[in-house]
Amino acid sequence: MWNAAWKGLIGHRLRFALTALSIALGVGLVAASYMFTDSLDRAFDDLFSATLSGFDLQVRPEVDEDLAFTQGAPLPEHLVDEIGRLPGIDAARGSIFGFAQVAAGGESLTNGTSPTFVVSWPELVDAFSIRSGERPGPGEGALDPSTATRAGLGLGDEIVVTGVGAPQNLRLSGTAAIEGFESFGGAVSVYVTLETAQRLLDLEDQVLTIEIETDEPLEAMIARVETVLPEGVEAVSAQSAAEEQLATFKEALGFLNTFLLVFAGVTVFVAAFLIQNTFRIIVAQRTHELATLRLVGASRRQVLGLVLVEAGLVGMLASALGLVLGVVLAQAIRSLLAFGGSLPTTSLELAPRTILVAVATGLIITLASALLPARGAGRINPIAALRRVLAPESPVTNRRRGIAGLLITLAGVGLLAVGLLGFELPVSNLVLVGSGAGIVFIGVAVLAAVFARQATATLGTPLAGLGVPGRLAVENAGRSPRRTAATASALMVGLALVGLTLVLADSLKTTADRLIGDRFEADLVVGPAGFGAARLSPQLAAELASLPEVASLAAVRDGQVLYQGETRTLLGGPTSLLPGLVNFTVIEGEISEITGDRIGMRSGLAEGLSIGDPVTIEFARTGPQSLELAAIFDARGIGAGLLVDSPTFADNFTEQFDSQIFLDLAPGVGLEEGRAQVESVTARYVGSQVLDQEELANEASLRIDELVRLVFGLLGVAVVVALIGITNTLTLSVLERRREIGLLRALGLSRRQLRSAINWEAILIALIGAALGMGLGLTFAWAVITALDDEILRMSIPWGRVGLSLVGAALAGLLAAAVPAWRASRRNILEAISYE
Amino acid sequence: MSSIAPALPAARAVEVVKVYGDGPTAVRALDGISLEVERGRFTAIMGASGSGKSTLLHCLAGLDELTSGRVLIGDIDLATLDDNALTRLRRDRIGFVFQAFNLVPTLTAAENIVLPLSLAGRQPDRDWLEVVISTLHLGDRLDHRPSQLSGGQQQRVAAARALITRPDLIFADEPSGNLDSRSGAQLLDFLRKAVDDFSQTIVLVTHDPNAAAQADRIVFLADGQVIDEMASPSTDRVIDRLHHLEA
C-alpha cells in the first residue's frame, strides 16, 4: 500500500507539486506567526532579564497590574539612603526612566516613530556597558551607539535634551547599550546622571525605582527593606520584576499572535479548497488506474486508503516545506510589522511547539480535504477499467446541490448574525463570526457549482468576438462546473476579505472626513508625529502660548486609569477653554464645571449615572479617588471617555507630558502665517507635528491606509494560494485535454490562439471568484456596519477600488495561466493525437 | 490552386528519413522514402504495424519533423516554415480524419465542421457547406455534441470538417478503424465520392484491404521503405499482394 502510494505520488509529482505548495504556504504562515511572536517574546525576555540583572531586589510603587504601563508615585530620594543603611545591603541606587526628546545641531535625533527615552545611568545593572567614551558625568549624556552613528555624532558634541522641564544642553560623553542589544528596539536612548534625569523629568529629590544589591537570603531582605517603606511602596526580587514585565508584554503579544493566526487560518482555509479540488481531479484522471486496482482485487477500503496515504505523504512533504517557507514569511512579517523599528529583533525562534502545530495543521488539513475525493475513489466501479475514454464529470445533481448549498449558507449566515449581534453565548464572538463566515464561504462554493456553467456563459458573452479561442475558453471554463466553482471559490475567500477591508476602511475614512470639521473648533492641532510613541514636552505649550499669533490654547494630557475594573483613558486639560476648541455634545451638566475633584464622562460610560453622583477612579500614582460627576458628554475630537481638569491630572499622574495641543489663532492672523509661527516653535521639539483640520482628516486616512496595507499584505498570501489553485487546475485540465488540444493544433489552432483560449479560461474563473468574493465582502461589510449600529458610521463603498480589485483579479488569473498556457502551446502535437 | 501547374503533385516526399531516439536504441521509422501524391486522386498507404505508415503521414502533414530529406506540399518545402506558418498551412490547405478523438467535445457538430474556418476567422461558403452536409447525411445532427453522436456519425463530421476548406489534400489515418463494418464502408464511400465528385486529393493510411481497395493507387510500406505499388486495386488483388509480400 505504502509502496503503491509512493509510486502514485512520484508518478504524478507535477500534479502534486502545486498542491503541496499551496498547503506549504498556509502552513508557512502558521509557522511564521508563531516564529515571529516567539522571537519577540524571546527578545523581550532577553531585554528584561538584561535590564533587571546585576541586582537582587527592586523597590517600586505598588501599581495594579492593569495599569502596568503607567508610572506610579515617585519615591522620595532619601529612601535610597535609608535602605542603603540597612544591615545586609551592599548597595542601593535610585533610578529614573522616562520620555524625552533629543536634538543635535537643531535637528531631532528621532528614529522614525520610535520613542526617545532618558535613562539615569544604571550603575548596578551588569548588562549595561559603555561602548565608547565614558559613562556620563554631570552635564553629560551618553547615546545608544546606533543613534550616535546615524547622527554622525562624536565625543564632546553637544546634544539638547528636553524632558518635562527646560531643555538641557549636554556634552556627549560616549555611547552605551545593553549587552546584545544595540538599542531598545530602535528607540533613541540617552543615559545621564540621576541628577540630570531628575531635572529633565521634573522629579527633584525623587526617584522612580530603587535597585538593591545584597548577598543575604532575598525573602528575609524583602521583609527587612519593607520596614522602612511607606504605604504604597513594595520590594520585589529582580527576577519576579522581570517576569511581571514580561507577562505584561506577552499579553500584548498574544493579541498579535492571534491577529496573525487569523490570516494564517484564512490561508489554510483557502488551501483546503485547492487540496480538495486537486484530489478530486486527480482521482477522476486516474479512474482507469484505480479501477484496474479494483479489478485485480483491491477492496474499496484499500483504494480509499491508497488515496489517503498519498494525501498524508503530500501533507507531510508540504508541512516540511511550509516550515522552511515559514522562516521567509516570518522575516516578511517582521518587516511588515516593524512599527518603525520599535520592536526588538533577535534571531528567529523555532520552538518545538511551532513545528508540531505546523506539521499537524498541514497533515490534518490535507487529510480532511482529501477525504471526500478519497471516498469517491473508493466508489469507482471496477468496470471503468475496461472503458477507454475518461468519463466526463458526473452531471451535478443541481437540485440537491442547490438545496444543500442554500442550507449551508443559511447556517453560516445564522452563526454570523449571532456572532455580530453579540448574543450572550459561552463562545467568543470572534470565533462565531469567523466560523460563520467560513460556513458561508463553503455554502456559496457549493452553490457556485450549480451556477458555474451559467455564470461562465454570461461572463463570457463578450468573448464571442474573439472567435474560436474565446468560444473554447467559455466552454472549457463551464465544462466541469464543480472544478471551476472550487477553483473560483478559493479566490472568492481572499477577495471577500479584501472587499470587506476596502469597504470598512473607506467607511471609516469618509466618516472621518465628514466629521473632522465637527470635531474641532481649533484652527491648529499640535500632536506627536507617527503612532504617538513620542510625547510632547510641556515646555512646547508654554512657548506656543507666548506667541502673539495664538489667541487661545489648550494642552491636554492623557493617561490610563481603572474604572469599574476596566482600563480606561483619562484626559486632563483646561476645561474652561476646551469647549471653545473641541466640539462637545453636552448631554448633562457643563464641561467648564469639571474642576477640582469633579469629572466628566462620555455618555456610553455614564450609563445609569447622573450629575452629582460619586465616581471612583483608580490611578497608578494615587490609588482610588472619589470624584463627583459634573458633565456627561459625547465628543469625537478626543479619544478619551473620562475628563478632568489639568491640576487634577497633574496631582494624580507621575508622567507629565502633553498628548495634544489645540490652538486658535488671534483674530486677523491668517492660517498660513499663524501656522508658520507655530511651526517655527515646534521645529525645535522633535516628534511633534502641526496639523490643520483638513490634514487631521488626512492623517486619519493615512493611519487607516497603513492598517489596510498591513491587512492586504497578510491577505496576499491567501490570494497567492488561490492563484496557485488556478494554475493547478489549469495544469491538470490541460493535461486532461491533451488529446483535444493536439487535435485543435493539428487542425490549425495556432500557439497564440491556444494560449489565448487558456488565458481567457483563467480570467473567467478568476472573475467568477472575484465577483462572488466582492459580493460577499460587501455583504459582510454591510452586516458588520449594521451590527455596530453606530449613529455616525455610514457605509461607503469605494467603487473605484472595488473595480480595481476585480481588474487585478482578472490580471492575476492571466498570470496564473501563464505557465500552463505556455506548456500547452509547446506540447508535441503528435504525442497528443497518437493512440497506438 | 489555379496558380499551381497541373503537373505538380499535391505532395512529395524526397528521401525522407525519420529516426527516433539515438545510439543503439535508435529506430529508423522512415528509411529514405520518396513518394509523390497525385492531385485529384485517392492514394492509400498500406503496411503492417510498425511499417512506418503513420509516421509517413505525420511527416507529410507537417506534424512531425524529419531527420533528413524533404517534404513539399504543392511547391512549399515544409522545412522552410516556422510553427505559425505550418499551423496556417495545416489549417488552410490540409484536412485530417483521424482514427478516433476527431472532434472537440465542447463544440456542436456544426461548430466542429466549420472549426478550421473559424480558426482562420473566416465565414464558411454557405453553398459548399450545404453540399458537404448533405453529402455526408449530417443535416439532422448539426446541433448535437460529439458525445450525442454515434461513432460513424462522429467520423462523418470529421470528414465534413476535412472537406470544408477544400484543402489541397486530406490525410485520413485509419478513419474506419474504430467503426463497425457497415459504418466503415459508408465512410469510405464518402471519401471515394469526394475524390470522384469534387476532385479532392486524399491520402489514406490503413491496413484494411477493403478500405485500401477504394483507392486509385496503393503504396506498400515495410520497415520504413516503399516496397511495392499497385494501381486500380481490388480487395482480392490487395489480399493476394499482401500474402505475397509477407511470404
Image (cartoon, coloured by chain):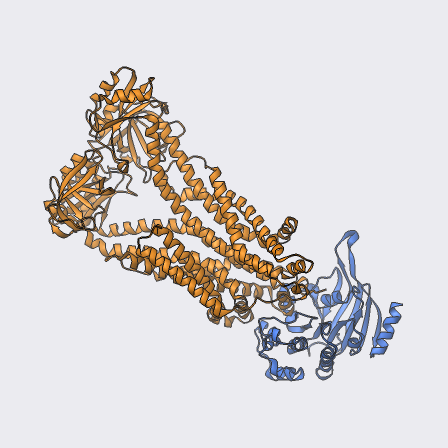
Q: Residue at the location (31% across, 50% down)?
A: A702
Q: Colour of chain A?
A: orange
Q: Is residue A113 above or below residue A301?
A: above
Q: Is residue A554 above or below residue A479?
A: above
Q: Quadrant of the C terminus of chain A?
A: bottom right
Residue A328 location (% of width, % of height) = 48, 43
In the foreground, A45 or A228: A228
Q: Residue at the location (39% across, 53% down)?
A: A434
Residue B112 location (% of width, % of height) = 61, 74
| Left or right, residue A438 beside residue B198 | left
Residue A321 location (% of width, % of height) = 54, 45
Residue A665 location (% of width, % of height) = 15, 47
In this view of the protein, can residue A337 be seen by the observer?
Answer: yes
Quadrant of res A175? top left
Q: How many marks do you count on the picture?
A: 0
Q: Colour of chain B?
A: blue
In this view of the protein, can residue A808 be seen by the observer?
Answer: no
